[in-house]
Amino acid sequence: MSRSENALREQICTLSKSMFDRGLTGGSTGNISARTEDGGLLVSPTGTSFGRLDPARLSRFDAAGNHVGGDAPTKEMPLHSAFYETRSTAGAVVHLHCCHSVALSMLPDVNEDDFLPPLTPYAIMKLGRVKLLPFFVPGDPAMGDAVRGLAGKRSAVMLAHHGPVVAGKDVESACNAIEELEETAKLALLLRGCNPVTLNAAQIDKLVRTFDIDLG
C-alpha cells in the first residue's frame, strides 16, 4: 500500500470522526468515499459509525470498480458511483444525515431546484445550486439514477427525509461543502417567518463571475 493511500485512509477517518463528534451524523449513519491515485476508491463500510472508522478496514475498489479489499461497502454505493460517473472533477463524495438539512427538506414550500435560499455567499461558492430529490428507500439504486439524470450539473443534492450528498475535488473540500450545506439549512430554519433579506440576483451574479461558479 502506497504512502499516499495510507494518508488518504487516515484523512477519511479523521474528517469523519470530526463530523461525528460535532453531531453532523449519528450512530451508523452517513458514508464517505474518495478516489485513490490509481483510479480506485476507498469507501466507508456498511453499518459503520463515522466516529469509529478503521483506516485498515475501509472498502477498497480498483479502477475497474471491483471490490478488492476491506469490509463490504456502504449500501449507498449507487449514490457515490453516480457522482463519479457524471462529474469528472469528483475526487470524493460525502453523505450525511444532518438534522437541519433533513428538517428543511420536509417543509412544503422548499424550492426543488434551489434547496438552499441564497443567505450567504459561502454556500453558493462551495455548492452552487442544490437539487432536492424525492424520498427513496435507503440503498435504492434509483437514487443513483436520479443523480445521473442531473448529467453532472450539480455537485450537491438533498435526499428528502434522508440527508445531503456532496461531491468535491477531494475529501477535505467535500466535507467542507457538506458542512456549509448543513449550516445554511440551519440558518434557513432559524429565519423562517422572519422575512430575511437574501442575496439578490446582481450579488449572486457577481459571486458567479468572481469565483467562476457553475450553478448548473
Image (cartoon, rainbow, N blue to C red):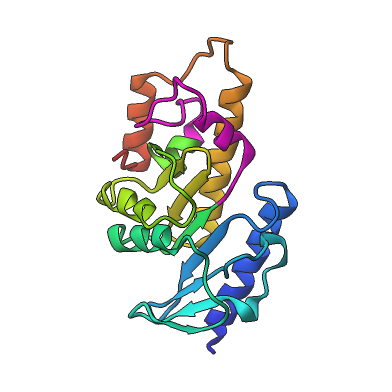
- Residue shown at the point (59%, 81%) measured from the top left: 6
Q: Is 27 on the left-hand or right-hand side of 131?
A: right
Q: Nearer the viewer, residue 46 or 68?
A: 46
- Classify residue 15 by image quadrant: bottom right
Relative to 169, say whether 204 is above or below. Answer: above
Residue extending farthest bottom: 1
Relative to 67, say whether 212 is above or below. Answer: above
Q: Nearer the viewer, residue 195 or 32?
A: 32
Q: Is 25 on the left-hand or right-hand side of 4?
A: right
- Residue shown at the point (53%, 43%) measured from the top left: 162
The C terminus is located in which quarter? top left
Residue 108, percent from left and from top = 46, 21
Main structural element of the magenta stretch: helix, strand or loop? loop
Residue extending farthest right: 21
Which contiguous range is marked in magenta? 96-122
The N terminus is located in which quarter? bottom right
Residue 86, percent from left and from top = 28, 58
- Residue shown at the point (34%, 21%) measured from the top left: 202
Q: Is residue 101 magenta?
A: yes
Q: Is 4 on the left-hand or right-hand side of 88?
A: right
